[in-house]
Image (cartoon, rainbow, N blue to C red):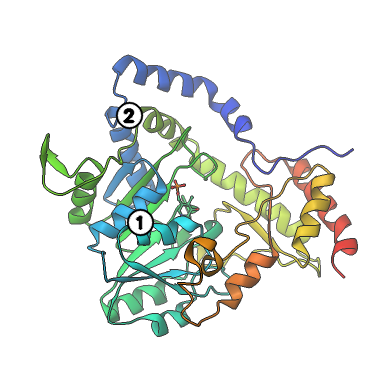
Amino acid sequence: MTTAVPFLDLKAQYLTIKDEIGEALEAVLESTAFVLGPAVDAFEAEFARYAGVEHCVAVNSGTSALQLALLAGGIGRGDEVIIPAMTFIATAAAVEYTGARPVLVDIDPHTYTIDPELVEAAITEHTKAIIAVHLYGNPAEMDPLLEIARRYDLLVIEDAAQAHGAEYNGRRCGSLGDVAAFSFYPGKNLGAYGEGGAVTTNRSDVADRIRMLRDWGQKEKYHHEVIGYNFRMDGFQGAVLGVKMKHIESWTELRRSAASLYDELLGDSAELTIPTQRPNTRHVYHIYPVLVENRDAVKSELQTRGIATGIHYPCAIHLQACFKGMLQNGTDFPVASGLADRELSLPMYPELTASQSEIVCTGLRSVLPACVV
Ligand SMILES: *Cc1c(COP(=O)(O)O)cnc(C)c1O
């Protein structure tokens, strides 16, 4: 029996920061600042600096961050928002929450992010924004998207939920468009110990609007300018994230080293497609995706060997039951569908050891001949 390798190991990371976390949570308890408060303020300042922007507004989830980014951009009923056909459901759901309609565009077969060459054909008189998703921690191809957005006067929103610290042409994801949404769901590259998210932007009008919207639409207590939301971050999450900011860069480098080792151990396999990192980008490997035929068989063979894997995601947006074909418009999205059929996510977290990575690669290579014909 080989050693088990989990897909994710949140406990391993917790053990490395246990004392700092304990002290930070204790301070919140003593302060009784349970919602927003000094720990959240300090985290916002730190995260804005990290993302290379003027403003960070912390909220209760990445989904709320997306929703508020759209609302602050004036998106609503009757509008269309272009999104990639392969992403987590939240990207599409957040558009729906505003009353606008998501319009899908297929992804690029190498970057797995929205294909800029297909965007222009999806633009109509109702199009107001493009959401670029930095899927798996790999930056979307932003320059052509920004150029199209300038020409058609569209807002560019980054879904950076998987891309903390990722870079494109030397600039951090979260600073590349008009406004960006981050998630701090526990398994993300920067994970809270509960739900959390944030909006980043250089636009002070957008930041002010989002601060108001996350807190019941009030600027002054009990004077509500607009119907807002209860989307505030809680104090414990601010404290946990504040501690983790001290480690995010070293954890990101550990992910990148683990990815390099996978590249080295799997790169010459004819049956696998490994992820590519373009030279002008810093990929932060939220996910290490390989493409393989008969993915489900490979996955279950690995599972019997004690190697856990994931699938991100098994169903493209246009095929999700909740949308019942309503986003398809007679179009197919073959690259997104192909990714859904073949993608397999290997174990990936900063604490993954070299010997664990070797077990994963040896296991994977040994099951391929029987699974891939
Ligand atoms: C996780 C994720 C979200 C949603 O974030 P939550 O904090 O879970 O609400 C949105 N988009 C993408 C691409 C994600 O991976």
The residue carrying mark 1 is 180
- Quarter residue 372 falls in: bottom right
User: Mark 2 is on which residue type?
Assistant: Ala
Category of crowding for the residue at label 2, using alpha-carbon neighbours closer than 10 angstroms: few (below 14), some (14–19), many (at least 20): many
Asked whether residue 197 is in view, the answer is: yes
Horizontal relation, residue 20 to residue 128: left or right: right
Say what secondary structure mark 2 lies in: helix
User: Going by the picture, which residue comes out furthest to the top?
Assistant: 30
Above or below, 325 against 248 in this view is below
The structure residue drawn at horizontal position 64% and vertical position 36%, both measured from the top left corner, is 9
The structure residue drawn at horizontal position 61% and vertical position 57%, both measured from the top left corner, is 312
Q: Do the residues labelled 1 and 2 touch (CB within 8 Å)?
A: no
228 or 73, nearer to the observer: 228
Mark 2 near ligand 1 (CB under 8 Å)? no
Question: How far across and down, in percent of the image, does residue 75 sit?
Answer: 26, 64
Quadrant holding the C terminus: bottom right
Above or below, 73 against 355 in this view is below
- Quarter residue 202 falls in: bottom left
Question: How far across and down, in percent of the image, does residue 29 sit?
Answer: 36, 17
Horizontal relation, residue 20 to residue 262: left or right: left
User: Mark 1 is on which residue type?
Assistant: Ala
Say what secondary structure mark 1 lies in: strand
